[in-house]
Amino acid sequence: MSKKILISLFILLWNTALVHAEDFMNEVARANDLYASNNYLQAADSYESLRERGFNNGHLYYNLGNTYIRLGKIGPAILNYIRAQKLIPRDENLQANLNYAIQQTRDKIMPPPPDTLATLFFWVSDLSVNENINFALAINLTFWLILTAWFYFRTDFLRLVRNSILFSLLLAFVAIGVKLHLESSSRTGVVLAKTVSVKSGLDASNITLFELHEGALVNITDERQGWVEVQLDSKKKGWIPKDSLEV
Amino acid sequence: MKLFFNKAALLFLLLCMGLSSPVFAEDIRALASVDRNQITLEDNLQLSITIQGTQNTPPPELPSLPDFRVTSSGTSSSTQIINFKRSVSITHKYRLTPMNIGQFKIGSARIRANGKIYTTNPITIVVQKPTVQNQSADKSVFVETNVSKKTAFVGEQLIYSFKLFHRVEAKNLDLSMPFGASHFQKEELGKAKTYQSVINGIQYQVQEISVALFPIKPGKAAIPAAMLDLDIYHRTRSNRRGFFNDPFFGQGIRAEHKVLRSKPLSVKILALPEKNKPRDFKNIIGQFNIQANLGKNDLEVGDTTTLTITVSGKGNIRGVIFPEPDLNLQFKVYPDKPEFKQAVAANQITGQKTFKFALVPLKSGTVTLPTLTLDYFDPEAKFYRQIKTRPIILTVRPSSTEETLNHVQSNSINNNLKKTEIEILAEDILPIHTQLNDFQNVNNEIGTSTLIRFVFPALLFVMAAFFIRKQKRWTTDVAFYRNQKAYKTASQKLENLTRSQKSEPKEFVSKLSEILREYIGDKLNMQGKAITAAEVEQKLKESDYQDNAANETRKLLEKYEALQYTPVSSGNNLELLNESQNIIKILEKKS
């Protein structure tokens, strides 16, 4: 009896998940149609509603970025391209559109170049977190299969393969760590306000060091009392109100 | 001796702990000070904000200072230990450059420390005009700006120059040279020039930088004052004879930071005259020459020649454009990308712009290429001029061979096409993504399911390894094989025996005895048939079987022997069979 209840519950949950996925697909298709018929405002609302409902997808962010470009909102467009980049980092169209959007900004600030760690683990930036994990899972499965085979046929060749795959597995684990570290340590923010004055301290009465404009990409280094410390390079650093940008 | 060192080490440790302990006794204070209260527009002010009692504070939040340009000039910290009392402080220094004259108040700076806010004392500053002595009499250093013309036409080239005159060493120059971007377009004229100049009998080192300005609209255009920050070094001679008794070492150097401002300038910009203005005038202003050349004047149909038009002169030559010449369908025309070379001569932008058109004649005969004209406004003469190329005559002969013609034509046209770059007309974003299959929700979190997926292959491996190991042992370890197979074999034999209960009791008992002995033999990896009941008991005990089970086995075997050798067997087969099965089960459980 309890087995039947469990199976029914599983089928119910599975069907609910399928219905949700289908709902998402229908909404995406509707938003794409709105975009195609130049109803950009409604398309943006539709994409945004999906995002707010927890739908997380690189192509969704890419399409939303395109929609904002069409609406002339460069800041939100760049923000969504940057979000998409974390999920579909090798998408060439995304890179082209991001570059185009940055060229439309007044400050024309390109994303920061990779640091030493990212250069050392050069492949990590080209893979999303999930891809890094799936890659490690594949190597993990291969390793245990090879280990099983080696257990049965103890040949020198299999030992060499086993050791190579073990090394790759360890590297894949370190790569996941590096990816998570890079994702958490580098907080890139996008200025959404038309113009924002970068102050020397946490108060509007402080002196203005320089100005940033909509769409400027900044590195967030600190956050206090409704203000965030932003840094462009070793010389350009200061505080701006937190609500003038989004991460 | 060792005790002495121990005590000394303890004392040193206590001293260190005392020194490194927090300065709980010292109050935190914030002080602001300036190096002077009265300055001129040529001077800088050093504002120092000192925080006493701590060094771990964020930078001070300065008050709004719209009348000064504020630049940070570093931080210094200090630690003092007097009578075992430690006091610390940190000083943030700022350079304030006055922008206006008047009396100004530097408000309180705010410092956050230990969760409290400390403020500094306000300071009043008086900024005055530079004194007459500063401006003219003491002409060790001064600046000057000038513009080549006070009245100019829209689009006419003007030269705006900034000159620094100095008799003393000048370093760390930081020039701000606004030019009035709402009235002019600017073009750089290269690096600064350095030369000597004598003014009123005094020799100066001059550093001059110039830019070309092109007015963009008529009216009165103001060029704001340029501002130069610099450090100057005065050599002072002391009376004391210095090192090695050499007068060189008796000299001292005094550094001084200065801010020099030029006077603002104004230029009257005139609109271009409407009188005699050519139709479709392209706002080309200056003085120009035009020249046209043809690569070959004698060629065959399908052959290629290049028409080169060169415009040179001074002015906004970059804006000169020539459309593709209209050659009445007698030629195929392939325009090349114009080449522009700019030069600066006598502080004027001069240049040369070259237009190339590849011409492929389509008909034979003598052809005169039409003249090409350029209209421009000459600001010196204040009227419009037109310059034109000379007519060019060329002879086109019929093609000698059609095949060769095609070959040559093909190659030459391709060559010309290769030179022509694709013109980017506009840029746009790439389209949205419409493949619905790619719109799957992505979960980026590393959860339990991910960990299970990592651990699951390892668990499978452990199971597989256990299985493989067992398989290997079956094939290589005879004792293990016999041990594992013993129960199954014995059960099988007992079952067969059950089916044949009708056999003779003695024979039945003999077989039961044999099955039990073989079972024990398999279990203990020995020859079971030849062993006595007492030996079985002993071996079972040695193999960690319980004494009780060993005794029972011995008794059963003895019972078998007794039944086999008594003249008349009185045993019940079924009872014996059950007894045997039970003892095997007991032994199997204990094994």
Image (cartoon, grey):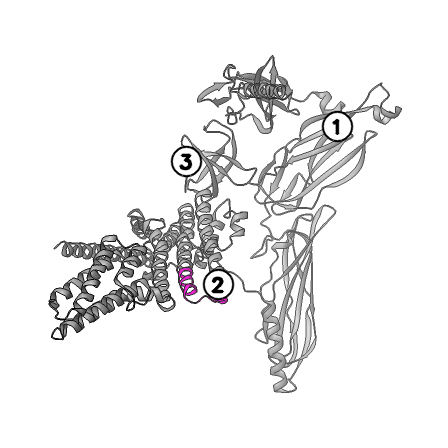
Q: Amino acid at mark 3?
A: Lys
Q: In x, y percent, where is residue B82?
A: 61, 14
3D distance between C-alphas at marks 1 and 2: 75 Å
Q: Which numbered disc covers residue A159?
A: 2
Segment colored magenta: A141-161
Q: Amino acid at mark 1?
A: Tyr
Can residue B293 be seen here? The reply is yes
Parent chain of label 1: B
Q: Nearer the viewer, mark 3 or mark 1?
A: 3
Q: Is residue A231 above or below residue B350?
A: above
Q: Amino acid at mark 2?
A: Arg
| Residue under label 1 | B233
The residue tagged with tag 1: helix, strand or loop? strand
Q: Residue furthest right?
A: B245
Q: Is B405 displayed left or right of B540 in the figure?
A: right
Occupied quadrant, residue B6: top right
3D distance between C-alphas at marks 3 and 2: 56 Å
Towards the viewer: B509 or B165: B509
| Residue under label 3 | A242
Q: Main secondary structure of the magenta part?
A: helix
In magenta stretch: residue B591: no
Q: Are marks 1 and 2 in contact (CB under 8 Å)?
A: no
Q: Nearer the viewer, mark 3 or mark 2?
A: 2
Q: Quadrant of the C terminus of chain A?
A: top left
Q: Is B439 displayed left or right of B99 in the figure?
A: left
3D distance between C-alphas at marks 3 and 1: 46 Å
The residue tagged with tag 3: helix, strand or loop? helix
Parent chain of label 3: A
Towards the viewer: A214 or B287: A214
Occupied quadrant, residue B332: bottom right
Towards the viewer: B268 or A74: A74
